[in-house]
Amino acid sequence: MCKQFKLKSVSPTPSLFLQVIWNLISMCTIYINICFNVVFFHFRMPAARRDPRYSVQDITEIVEDGESDVDIPFDDTDASDEESDNDCVDNENQEPSDCPANSDIELREHEPIMPRDRYHWQKKDFISPNTDFSGPPVTDHVTFLQTPLQYFQKFVSEDMIQALATSTNEYSVQKNARSVNTNTKEIQKMLGMYLRMGLVQMSGSRMYWETDTRHPPIADVMPRNRFQSLLTKLHFVNNLTASEIEKKDKLWKLRPWLESFRENCLQVVPEEHNSVDEMMIPFKGKFSSIKQYMPGKPHPWGFKVWVRAGISGMMHDFHVYQGGKKGIRVKSELGLSGDAVLKLASTLPKGQNYKIYANKYFTSVPLMVKLLEHGIHYVGKARQVRLPNCNLKDEKTLKKEGRGSFDHRVEGTHNICAVKWYDDRAVTLVSSFTGPEPVQEIQRWDKATKTYIDVERPYIVATYNKYMGGVELLDLLTAKYKFTLKSRRWYMYIFWHTITLAVVNAWLLYKRHYAAGSPLAARKRPSSDEGSPNCPSKKSCSHPPLDVRKDLTGHFPMKLKRGRCRHCSKGYTNTQCSKCDVRLCFSEDRNCFWDYHCK
């Protein structure tokens, strides 16, 4: 028999009534908070800044170039505060950084904004100014070739090595309460070992001393433990005497070395044609606030260095980029890239018609005007958005006109020429001293007909292609024999890179002097024995370079057949130097072995 169920009415209890009231009050409170936050942020947020407008072509060029700093405001200013966050992001290590991506960016108010009608472009012929170079020749006062060590010491001087040895000893006492007792000779050996590691590369520095992979030119110079100990003690400044103002510089631990190296680079006579570009020092470690990320580069992670180099690849000036100071980047008319070019160009002599070449990241019309005020001319690729009021034909129109077509405009006030040329795609260049004329005919491969065809090319394009690759050549030369010594101190990677740069600069300077021709009749450093009556022939009087002869390293006497002494040329001896390969007297009456190597 089924039971009949009945619903019973439940009378509301005081606790249930209070719970409903509490839920209503909570919902009202949440709604009021939301409304308050919306109104508060609406009045507090500044007016939205109008973003620059990019064409499809501009976006394609930016992506293909892989540039991390996209700062193209429509008012022709280089808004460095709007750079891509990828420039300083370190998502891999998740470490705090002073880069703009990790901190709030503050800008100075009331900065002057360049009006769009500041420059007036016209369709007329470009009249090239007189740009005859009046600077000193690069081979002035060259009378003879020096030794390789002497060329290297032009960039890494003995004073720099002495300061490095002194700071290393002081740092070892501060760290371990015991001095490492190094000296300039040992530091020079260490640098030579590092350069030798670049010639014979192994997977780790310890392998040069292992039994199976031992390399005598390195292992015989210094024991492994001593080499490793010096690696951890190398230092460039006294930490205890550094002031708080000096420590605000993110590179303060390396600053004395960098300044000395830069001053030595500036002593070399600059070339007429200079290129400015970015150089990346590879580094993916932690604990560095100046590490940058630049997609599209061979080494996207590392330290960014602004470099000015000659067409030969020789570096004349540089500046290590440190990002914003405490996350603050001051907006200027030239922007970050323009300020970098202006700083590197400031060390060039003024009014002597030097030329600078740069890519589209650096190029802007205000930069060219600033350089013209100092008597320095400029050629570079440009983005259309950085040329306000310059109505060049668009890429579609030039493509219809055919391969090799171009259009140009001239800025009347400052005599600056802008040329847009179409080959496989359109490219825009601006210059203060060259234009489209004379037009040259070059051969290009045509995929449709599978033959070479004649294409017209403006003269400004040929000039840019000829003189732009200085920094890229320098990158190529430094990467050939570079060896990476791992370190927990991130600034050591910059130090070892300067050693490689010094070797490249020394070799290029030697090539410059060697190619001078007539001033170098002897083609080598004159020896003290040349021209003496006891020197029957030039071949028999060959001596090792002075920096090898007097380095006090590895000169051991060996017994051979009796022959004439090469130092006094009077006695006969059977003692020969194992390193210099010359016979020298070594007896009770005469010690030419000592005189030859030490005096």
Image: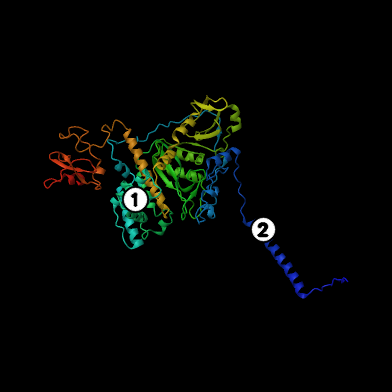
The reply to whether the C-beta atoms of the residues labelled 1 and 2 are less than 8 Å apart is no
Mark earlier in primary sequence (1, 2): 2
User: What residue is rendered at 53% in x and 34% in y?
Assistant: 428
| 277 sits left or right of 37 in the view | left
Residue lying at the far front in this picture: please name it.
Answer: 1
Q: Position of residue 527 (x, y in %)?
A: 22, 38
| 186 sits left or right of 45 in the view | left
Amino acid type, callout 1: Thr
Give the alpha-carbon distance from disc 1 to disc 2, as whole Å.
72 Å
Tell me the crowding category of disc 1: few under 14, some 14 to 19, or many 20 or more residues within 10 angstroms, Cα based.
few
Report the residue marked by disc 2. Answer: 38
Tell me the crowding category of disc 2: few under 14, some 14 to 19, or many 20 or more residues within 10 angstroms, Cα based.
few
Question: Which of 137 and 584 lies nearest the eye of the viewer?
Answer: 584
| 173 sits left or right of 128 in the view | left
Residue lying at the far right in this picture: please name it.
Answer: 1
User: What residue is rendered at 74% in x and 71% in y?
Assistant: 19
| 208 sits left or right of 44 in the view | left
